[in-house]
Image (cartoon, helix red, strand yellow):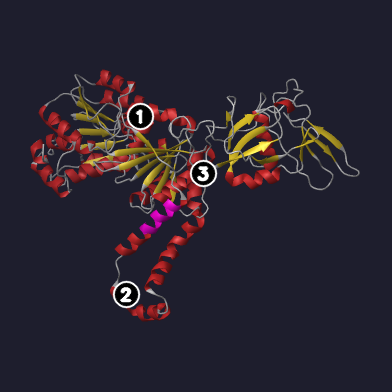
Amino acid sequence: MKSFIETGIRPELQRAVKELGFEIPMPVQQQVIPRILESTRDIIALSQTGSGKTAAYGLPLLSLINESLRVPQILILSPTRELCMQIANDMTDYSKYIGGLKTLAVYGGASIENQISELKQGVQVVIATPGRINDLIRRKRINLSGITAVVLDEADEMLNMGFQEDLNTILDSVPETRRTLLFSATMSREIHDIASEYMKDAEEITIGHKNAGADTVSHNYYIVQASDRYLALKRIVDFYPDIYGIIFCRTRLETKDVAEKLMKDGYNADALHGDLSQQQRDYVMQRFRVRNLQILVATDVAARGLDVDDLSHVINYNLPDDDEIYTHRSGRTGRVGKSGISVSIISLREKKRISMIEKKIRRKFEQKNVPGGSEICEKQLLNVIDRMKSVEVNETQIMKYMPAIIDKLGELSREEIIAKFVSVEFNRFLDYYKSARDINVVNSRDDTPRGKNNRNAAYALFRINLGTMDGLTVPRLIGLINDCTRNSKISIGKIDLKRKYSLFEAEKDFQGTILNAFKNIEWEERAVVVSLYTDKKPEFNKEKYSGGDGYGRREGRDGGGYRGKRSSSDGNGQRNSYGGKRSSGSGSKSSDHGGYGNDRKQGKGGSKRDRKRG
């Protein structure tokens, strides 16, 4: 099928879609339009969000409508106000050359009295959210006796949002002779239930594979420490200067936090979550639609049913709990045949989730490295140059200032002028990223083989003169490091406990911090000595411990969840002593072989306290 003429839709609709720039029907349109026009069967169409479903059902249903009857004949249900309005706009655009045909969107947050008034004037197509149409049914303010077709658009989204009872009420209120057309991105058990109860002899049309992701979307993931997640997000956004996308978070609190951080850091972003009023939500969405915002940070609930074209990226700040939700998230980009990128920021322990989602959506993910400072600076610099080249110069306005400008810049060479103008925009990136560290986590099992003599270049190897004979355990060593450095965010790598000494890896950026922190520290009245381990090929034994997900931060934990706290030496006679008996965090019996109780001795006139931590 090479054109919309071949689909058999009315000439008025052919004229409208031609003006809209529609040329070749998309796969879902090629299959669905003829079936609606040529058959009276119910249809279940499984196709990705943004694949052209509105035109697939809208054009043939408008072709079959009787515009001389001023009663509702088509009822289209959508999960959200935003999608409802978008569908109404599309249906109005398609039907612009069909005289006497009127569409109406009914949804919550707008005046129901105004909507009732417009219904009284006569409409043929009603696009509604389930809650508002149910309200009209209860008030007996809408006549559904003339409905010939009901469309459930984004049916899986409506069921996910808890609209099943509303849908049951609505479908019980329309004539049994109507057709039911169900469009969904995924085929869930609830969709099957709706189909079996309310659809007759339904024909199933699947574009691609069931529950599969769109071919136009690339799926990438980055592995970082959880503490570096926001840092990774900033680098990804900076690496794509023209990004126009949605960042998905799990909770309202996280959404607010990420959006506030981005705005504080100078990014053109805002948040969309359930705590916003409808007026605030509309304001944010309007700014995003017209691209006054580059980045929208949203929860899944807030973003359901959003219909925004041309998104370049969807970023999963956290993977969703339900794999099906990933399909909906990624479907926000790569719409109507355009390409898009779905990005996930994960920790190493979430790698298995990526494999599970790959199987679900039948798409391969590509692991990427979080861009470094030099890569980001190069990308940003070239973007500045491209913007400079494409800017339109208003000759009439600017020429009168040129003599003064030339006078001020006369002493500079051409190269100097270019460098200075670029630097005005670019210097903040150079300053910010000049000493940026590598935050990528090495997947020792899958990506970079790290045998007993291989170590991550971002980590330094330290030797401490404490071992198992001193009662040292892995959690106690990590707690000791946290205590002495007063920084629980230092990533710890491999730990190898020997009998008389131990080896541990920690981030190179904190090398000086660690060495300085262990000065004047005692363990059971024995001076603690930490030094860099100079042997380039340390023999880690089989009992080595890899902190976090291979390289990661862990709290010092052992049984009761103990985490030590260091009291610094301040010249007033205090002594840092790590040792003595330790009480477990649960308040159970003490262990006689380790821990670090602070044996504090105050100076003149002070008291003495034994502090047992658990």
Q: Residue at the far right: name it.
A: 605
Segment tinted magenta in the rendering: 374-383
Q: What residue do we see at 16% from left, 31% from top? A: 31
Tell me the crowding category of disc 2: few under 14, some 14 to 19, or many 20 or more residues within 10 angstroms, Cα based: few
Q: Which residue is mark 3?
A: 257
Q: What residue do we see at 10% from left, 39% from top? A: 2
* Amino acid at the residue labelled 3: Asp
208 vs 501, nearest the viewer = 501
Tell me the crowding category of disc 1: few under 14, some 14 to 19, or many 20 or more residues within 10 angstroms, Cα based: some
Image x and y of residue 249, in percent = 45, 38
First along the sequence among labels 1 and 3 = 3
* Amino acid at the residue labelled 2: Gln
Evaluate whether residue 268 shows in this view: no
125 vs 264, nearest the viewer = 264
Image x and y of residue 428, in percent = 48, 59
Q: Which residue is mark 1?
A: 358
Q: What residue do we see at 47% from left, 57% from top? A: 429
State how far apart marks 1 and 3 are (Cα): 29 Å
State how far apart marks 1 and 2 are (Cα): 55 Å
Q: Please, what secondary structure does the residue beneath circle 3 have?
A: helix
Q: Which residue is mark 2?
A: 397
Image x and y of residue 343, in percent = 39, 40
Which quarter shows the C terminus? top right
* Amino acid at the residue labelled 1: Glu
Query: Is 266 rendered above or below residue 154?
Result: below
State how far apart marks 2 and 3 are (Cα): 43 Å
Label 1 or label 2, whichever lies nearer to me, is 1
Label 1 or label 3, whichever lies nearer to me, is 1
Which quarter shows the N terminus? top left
